[in-house]
Image (spheres, grey):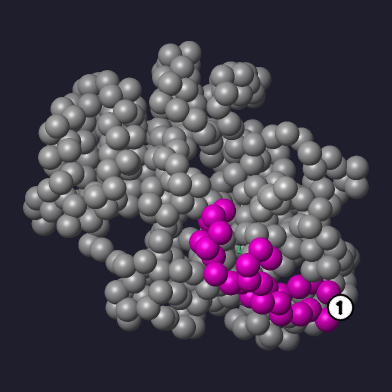
Amino acid sequence: MSIAAFRAELGDIPQEDNPRIVQQRSRDHYWYSPVLKAKLDHVTAEVVVSPRSNEEVKTVLRAAFKHGVAITPRGAGTGNYGQAMPLSGGAMLNLMNMDKVLDIKKDRVRAQAGAVLEKLDHETKAAVGGELRFHPSTYRMASLGGFIAGGSGGVGSIRWGGLRALGSILGLKIITCEAEPRELDLVGEDILKVAHAYGTNGIIVEAEMPLTEAHDWIDVMVGFDDFMEAAAFSEKLARQDGILLKELSPCAAPIPEAFFNRHKPYIKEGQSVVLIMVAPVSVEALALFVAHHKGEMLYRADKASDEELKRLPPIYELAWNHTTLRALKVDPSITYLQTRYPTLEHVKKIVDILGDELPMHIEMTRQDGLITYAGLPMVRYTSEERLEEIIRIHEENGCDVFNPHRFTLEEGGMKRTDQKQLEFKKEADPKGILNPGKMIAWENPDFDFSSGKAWLFDGLNPVH
Ligand code: FAD
């Protein structure tokens, strides 16, 4: 590998080689995990290149292929699993300069990979009154390409499911890493090869996403004295077909009181809360539902003063992995898990066993038409061995864990690597230059595809 020869072929494509800046850009939010922090702290690329067009991406990949330089794509670097960290050094490929919204229709938008999701929504709202169906809670920072390659779902998944569902991504344009890089337009089943693949089998340069009708969502916070009441209320509310929601998340005490600093004045000691985003047309129905279930309406943004609205972060920035971020700011020893609880009884079992060692945080989502408890519980971390034990306790009690303390696709458990995906990598990245070290199936020819594990991105199962 010759970085110097690679760089010499890039013409006027912006490059950055200040070691401090390169190291900063070689990191994502891997430090959420004490396990990943210890393993990946030293990792850095040698240069950051920032192409401005598809042609410039091709120039970078052509030179990388010729000189055997590892390429790690990067959007905003908000991924949590070290996905965007260059295990083999080489070059970071910063896609944030490619941020144009290319085409807006009533029901869909096409944009470049570096478009920030909030900006995308601004443009589609103004043009056709539409918005993305769902977005990560890093909405104000994250890129479209990074979300598709590294994320799974988020705010809106209570109604629309996640990226894994057919129809959640309409099309991708990728660029391959070959002697002569090609542009490929992926639609239908082919999209699943590249979604949540950490950029290991193609650089996403454009994506087409479905839109839904935009609403002026109202933030609401409801209190309960008991977490299991909050969780049961959340499931019942999720099943209310007439109440239009974008976010629904029960968080157990002491999370709200200990970590939701600016919302603290609304929260009583020992209270668990449910975070909600509701459409204006449904807010009164929600208020009735809350009263009926003996919840305490703690906060309603449509009744708040201008001063309160200015002071408070949007409720989605208390939810998803922002819940963990808020805790980490107060108590750096905290980490988290990603889980799936089949029923309320499973939630109760884990809460009973692990108590305050695992302050419970759930995101209610829809998956294959069913309301699902997607857990992002916090963990009061003591050791890697204990963390493994907590994972084992989940699995022994019938709860799935998608381990966020692993940087490979397969060990994280979100994405099942199958033969088709491996074949596609052979075609799109024959030298294994794209984000090396993240796909075990590529590194290990004896990899067993049939582990019997639960996967979030399961691919399409053939009907027999
Ligand atoms: P990056 O972190 O830059 O990249 C993510 C992965 O995609 C990396 O493997 C990278 O190599 C690859 N990649 C980036 N761009 C491209 C490209 N153009 N082509 C090919 N590969 C590419 N995730 C959720 O799904 N839902 C949430 O609600 C959520 N909440 C979060 C809250 C916080 C506070 C934090 C820190 C993270 C959260 N995440 C969440 C994780 C992350 O923010 C999202 O997945 C986000 O969409 C990633 O976008 P990014 O631009 O930062 O991608």
* Residue type, numbered disc 1: Ala
Q: What kind of element bears circle 1?
A: loop
Q: Which residues are magenta?
A: 163-190
Specify the quadrant of the image occupied by residue 396.
Answer: top right
Q: Is residue 410 left or right of residue 221?
A: right
**Residue at left offset 61%, top offset 24%:** 395
Residue shown at the point (76%, 35%) measured from the top left = 451
Per the image, the residue denoted by label 1 is 179
Relative image position of residue 182 (x, y in whole percent): 76, 80
Q: Position of residue 183 (x, y in %)?
A: 71, 80
Magenta residue check for 177? yes
Q: Is residue 267 above or below residue 276?
A: above
**Ligand 1: which quarter?**
bottom right
Ligand 1 within 8 Å of the CB at mark 1: no
Specify whether residue 181 is painted magenta.
Answer: yes
Left/right of residue 192 with respect to residue 156 in the rendered view: right
In the figure, 195 relative to 233: above or below?
below
Q: Position of residue 367 (x, y in %)?
A: 48, 45
Is residue 456 among the parts visible in the rendering?
yes
Say few, some or many: other residues with alpha carbon within 10 Å of mark 1 (under 14 / 14 to 19 / 20 or more): some
Q: Nearer the viewer, residue 326 or 219?
A: 219
